[in-house]
Every structure is written in structure tokens, then in C-alpha cells.
Amino acid sequence: MYEEYSEYLFFEERFITTKNGCLYFFEDPDSAMVGTASCILNCVSLQEDQCGFSALSKCEDFIRQFQFVMLVPNDEESRKQFVGGVRGQITYLPLFVAGGDYKGCKTVRDLYDKHGMHAIESLIYHSKELPAYGLLNISEVTPIDVTRMPRVLTGIRELDKVTGGSLMGDVSIWTGKRGDGKSTLVSQIIIEAVDQGKRACAYSGELKAERFKDWLYLQAAGPNHITSKRDAESDRELYFIDAHTRHQLDEWFDKRLFLYDLSINSAHDADSILRIFEYANKRYGCSVFLVDNIMTARFASSSDSSFYREQSNFVGRLVEFANRFNSHVHIVAHPRKGEIRDGDDVSGISDITNRAANVFKLERLSEDQATKQGCDSVLSVMKNRAYGDRASVGLCFEPKSRRFFKAFTGNPDKKYGWEFVEQQKFEELT
Ligand SMILES: Nc1ncnc2c1ncn2[C@@H]1O[C@H](COP(=O)(O)OP(=O)(O)OP(=O)(O)O)[C@@H](O)[C@H]1O
């Protein structure tokens, strides 16, 4: 009747009855025989040629017929490995582990031979139930303290009021039309994170490191530390920060902000981005990450039809990453061509936004609208999992520093930490 399982499990069929309810699981056939010889029903072990516990997955239908499983390990030494191995496979039934005094014996068989059936009964008598695998008793779960949730703020007060800040373990998606300022805003948010003592790591798929640094430093410096010069050839205003400020910024950003190096072989590979983010977390404690943008990441499968699915999978992996490394990941995501719609489906990328905790949309206004509304851009909270609130904030844009700030009440002159770091002075004593 149970012959098909005898390839994986050792047992004597005439001593198997599922009516009894309990399956006794021994470490080796010799020990399982002890149970059978002592008229304990349903004694089994893995067959000796089965070198892993994965064989148990082939016997699920057989094991499922019992009410619970009693594991009878050989001794204290092998117990952990045996129990762990079985527990990983039999997750659908209550498990008990026999224990107690092995009297120096290395196997159940040995214990039986030296001390008789009484010693085996004592092991079973002292069995303990293992806590449920994969189930939490809600009353034992430690509640979160909402006043101390690890998070990082965007620095735009009205936005943080709506979302409660960017929580660690979550992912935020930033979307909007091309050129509307997403990269500019998220790089400001990275500076804010560094200012709040977090370490950050950014993948910027379209900007070379030097250009990324130039823009970032102008933003971090702020308009009061920027000088301008007219370029005679193009007649454009060009912006600079002086060497002293640059040096202060270098010191402030040192080992606090890392940039994914696009010159490595596997640059843009989704796997590589995730691996390097993991390194940045483990080696430098980075907890705020930026993927700008998801369209420049490359995936194993290159077919057009699977591209959006791969992209969505990548977001899923970033969500897992944020959770596992207790970090926040900001992702810039463009709408698909011809799929710009409003409402719940943020610009046709709903399969991505479904996975994120926050979804923001940045829209740059036309000159007419800007004059009417008194702001240059509108940032909308399209989704916020923590509180469910939606809102729009009008933002102004300061062109020298590329800083965004709240329209009407905000200003672009915020001072970041680097301005407060005292320079070391050397004074010569007479
Ligand atoms: N409200 C604004 N007013 C004026 N200039 C802006 C505004 N927002 C952004 N910019 C400027 O527009 C340019 C494009 O911005 P940015 O690269 O941040 O846009 P993006 O949405 O990330 O673009 P893309 O989708 O192509 O990556 C930058 O030079 C930025 O400084």
C-alpha cells in the first residue's frame, strides 16, 4: 500500500497505521527498528541512501495522513541538524521532539540495547512541541512604536506630513514625464538623508559620476554659495562653487554617499545593482538607496515582450531588499510611451506602483500655469500605504542650485550639515 514511499523511507508496512495519528521519525533505520520491535506503530526513518531531507517532499501524501510527527533524534549532538532538516520539509503538521537522558549513548538503538525500552519511553515522555513554523501568535508579536519608526524625511515638510516620512523597509516610486525634474528632486532627497545622518548609495543610469557630483554639489551648496559666470560662446549662465566649499562638501559626503560605478563590466545589470547595494549596506551601513531610473537597468532576458515583466520583478526584488536590509529604496520610473493617464494607475505603470509603499508624481508646469498657481512644479502623493492620504504640494525651483522648495512658505536657502562643520585651524604659537 505504501510501497512507493519505501524508496525514500525505511519502515515495516505491517506496523504502519494512519489511524494511530502519530508518525515516529528516527534518524536511522536501526533506531527505527527499535520502535517497531517494541510494538510502537508508525516508526520510520529516511532510507540510508537518501543523503538529504529533501526526500521528505516526495512523501508528503504519506506523511499528511498522520496528525502529528514525533522526532526521535539520536543524541544531543545530531539533534539540531536532524530537527532543522525535518522541520524545513514538514511544515504542514505539528512536530514534537523527544528528549531527555541519553545516558551517554550515541543512537536510539544503542540506548535501547543498553537500557531497554524504558529509556526510549522516557525520551518520548519528555518530548516538547516545536513552535509553529511560519506562524506567529499575534499576541506575542512586539508592536511597533509609531513614534520611533525608523524613517528618513524628504525635507519638504508638507510632504512628510502626508506620508509620515520614508519608512525603512519601504520603497518609493517617483514618476512623471521626461525632463520634469524627478532626478533633480530625488538627488535633493538623498542630500536630505545624508543630512539626517543616514548613509546613501545611488545608481544613476544616465549620469556620469562627474556630472552627478556637479549637480549634487550645487544642490548641497545652495544658492548663497554659488557664483555664476556667463559663457561667452553660448551666452548661458554657468554656475560654480569655490574650492573651499567644495572641500567642505567633500569632507561631509566622505563615506556617507556612494555612487554605483557605471564603468564596471556588469553596469546596469539588475543583479549587479542589487549585489552592490548589498555590499554598500553591509560594508558602509548605507540604508537609503536610489535607482534612477528603472528603465536603464538591464535584465537577463532581453526580449521586448518580457521587459516590463522583468522590470516589475526587479522592483519586487528591490522591495525585498528594502525589507531585508531595513532600508528605504527610491526608484525613479518613467511612464510607458503613450500610456500617460491619471488616477490610480499612475501613468500606466501600475504593476510597478502596486509593489511600492509610496508613489509620487512630479509635474512641471507650463509658464502660464506657473504664473497662475505661483509655483513651478506640482508634487502629488498618488499612494501612501502608511496613512492612505493623498495630497499635492506646489514647489518652486531655484535654477542656480536646482533646489526645490515649498511654494509661498519655503525658501531655497536651507543650510545642510557641511556648513556647520568647523574647519580645523592651525595657529602658530609664539
Ligand atoms: N521646475 C523646473 N523648472 C526649471 N527647470 C527644471 C525644473 N525641474 C527640473 N528642471 C531642470 O530640468 C532638467 C531635467 O530635470 P531632471 O533630469 O531632473 O528630469 P527627469 O524628470 O529626471 O528627466 P528624465 O525623465 O529624462 O530622466 C534639469 O536640468 C533640471 O535642473
Image (cartoon, helix red, strand yellow):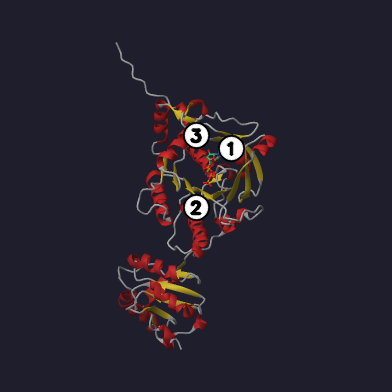
Which residue has dot 2 on it? 294
Is 78 situated above or below 272? below
Q: Which numbered disc, 3 or 2, marks the residue that appears first in the sequence?
A: 3
Q: Looking at mark 1, is its residue's CB closer than 8 Å to ligand 1?
A: no
**In the rendered structure, are the residues bearing label 1 and label 2 in contact, judged by CB atoms less than 8 Å apart?**
no
Find numbered disc 2 in the image and state the secondary structure of the residue it sits on. helix
Q: Residues within 10 Å of mark 3 (few under 14, many from 20)?
A: many
Q: CA distance from mark 3 to mark 2?
A: 23 Å
In this view, the residue in front, 157 or 129, is 157
Q: Nearer the viewer, mark 1 or mark 3?
A: 3
Image coords of residue 359 (percent x, y): 59, 49
The label number, if any, that marks residue 219 in the structure image:
3
Q: Amino acid at mark 2?
A: Ile
Q: Is residue 91 left or right of residue 81?
A: right
Secondary structure at badge 3 equals: helix
Q: Residue at x 43, y 88 (%)?
A: 14
Q: Disc 1 residue type?
A: Ile
Residue 27 on image: x %, y %: 36, 74
- Residue 222: x and y, percent? 51, 30
Residue at mark 1: 156
170, 100: nearer the viewer: 170
Q: State the separation of the CA atoms marked 1 and 2.
A: 24 Å
